[in-house]
Image (tube, helix red, strand yellow):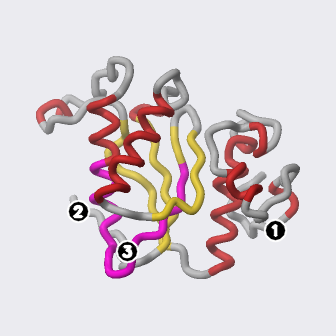
Amino acid sequence: MRYRRAVVAGGTYFFTQVTEQRRPILTVPGGIDCLRAAFREIRQKHPFRIEAIVVLPDHLHCIWTLPENDGDYAGRWRLIKTWCTKHWPAPVPEASDATRPARGERGLWQRRYWEHTIRDERDFQRHFDYVHYNPVKHGYAASPATWPYSSFARAVRAGIYEPDWTCTDRDLDGIGCE
């Protein structure tokens, strides 16, 4: 089956990437470092701007902006996931699906990811807020400022948020901060 995805060269996208069987492995010792290294490595060869990111134990959300005349976010995700799997600091669990080893796949990531093309500034702000509030939504943190695996502190330094910002400060119009 071929998935149809919207591709806009130079576009801005919101992504959700989940671990295989939602295993809580992304925030284990070395896991965050491996993920950061993968993003750093791939961005050197295939540039993109990370507008916002949050990493939770079993999934991550991020917003990327691609360079003008470039819409290949799928290739970047493939490279990031492959790099992470090859360099993961602990044994990667076996894949749950018997067809995956035959394809050279291991059990770190779900095959697919969720992608949404950001339509306008309001859509961007809603997703930006969603990314940063996500650790609170899932019960991992009392406030966005207390979750260490997020671009929230960078947004505070840039003057986008106050340090004590919470999702209730904005109307997210159904994107899901509750």
Query: In the rendered structure, are the residues bearing label 1 and label 3 in contact, judged by CB atoms less than 8 Å apart?
Result: no
Check disc 2 and give the amino acid type.
Arg
Taking 101 as reference, is 136 left or right? right
Q: Residue at x 85, y 57 (%)?
A: 162
Q: Residue at x 78, y 43 (%)?
A: 145
Query: In the rendered structure, are the residues bearing label 1 and label 2 in contact, judged by CB atoms less than 8 Å apart?
Result: no
Front label number (2 vs 3): 3
Q: Position of residue 34 (x, y in %)?
A: 42, 33
Q: Position of residue 95 (x, y in %)?
A: 28, 28
Question: In what element is the residue under mark 3?
Answer: loop
Q: Residue at x 47, y 29 (%)?
A: 31
- Disc 1 marks which residue? 171
Q: Residues within 10 Å of mark 1 (few under 14, many from 20)?
A: few
Q: Which residues are magenta?
A: 61-79
Q: Which mark is residue 6?
A: 3
Taking 124 as reference, is 82 left or right? left
Q: Position of residue 90 (x, y in %)?
A: 37, 18
Q: Which mark is residue 27?
A: none
Question: In what element is the residue under mark 1?
Answer: loop
Q: Position of residue 78 (x, y in %)?
A: 28, 51
Instruction: Please tell me in which quadrant of the rendered image residue 11 appears.
Output: bottom left
Which of disc 2 and disc 1 is earlier in sequence?
Answer: 2
In the rendered structure, does residue 62 fall within the stretch colored magenta? yes
Taking 160 as reference, is 149 left or right? left
Q: Quadrant of the N terminus?
A: bottom left
Question: In what element is the residue under mark 2?
Answer: loop
Question: Residue reaching furthest top?
Answer: 91
Check disc 1 and give the amino acid type.
Asp
Q: Residue at x 52, y 21 (%)?
A: 29
- Disc 2 marks which residue? 2
